Amino acid sequence: MPGSELPISGLPEVAGADPAAPDSGARNSGVPDAGSPSSDPPDPDLLASDLAGSETRAQSAKLELAERADPLGDLSILAFLRRHQGQPVEIDASRLRLPNGPLVETLLVAARTWRARGIAFSITGLAPGHVEQLRWLGLAAPLGLDPGAEVLPV
């Protein structure tokens, strides 16, 4: 809807997606899940800053996209974004070979949601040719890939 915030929780549910489930295809190098038996105990300072949404103290959660990342076929992408709402997120696209439509749409919704909440959301490592294609389509600035460009409200 034009002019309204599109929260990541508003993305369509994917059958079998469990936001609490561990990532399957994408690698998550963010904050360990507190419920995971193999994880270290959470850092109380980190959790406090995550709850406060402070970019200066909160550690970014990082998601490394696979070569053929697709949120419709890889439920871990949406699960990661839902799990890390309220904290800075970095999407590492250095292995991504071709950004498909559903992935770009998911990242657009996430970038807009994080920006509206004043929380950092970045996409790194995307091939220059892909950035140029997204720029040509007018999507580089809304994705945060064109720092000097103005992001117009939708």
Image (spheres, helix red, strand yellow):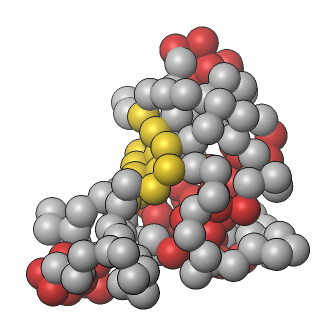
Relative placement, left or right, of 149 versus 50 is right
Q: Residue at x 49, y 28 (%)?
A: 94
User: x and y percent of residue 131 in the render?
Assistant: 56, 22
Relative placement, left or right, of 62 versus 68 is left
Relative placement, left or right, of 44 versus 129 is left
Q: Which residue is drawn at 45% across and 71% down?
A: 84
User: x and y percent of residue 50 in the render?
Assistant: 28, 78
Question: The N terminus appears in which quarter of the rendering?
Answer: bottom right
- Residue 102 makes an appearance in the image: yes
Q: Which residue is drawn at 69% across and 78% down?
A: 18
Q: Residue 61's quadrant in the figure? A: bottom left
User: x and y percent of residue 135 in the render?
Assistant: 61, 24
Question: The C terminus appears in which quarter of the rendering?
Answer: bottom right
Q: Nearer the viewer, residue 133 or 87?
A: 87
User: x and y percent of residue 12 in the render?
Assistant: 81, 71
Relative placement, left or right, of 126 versus 148 is right
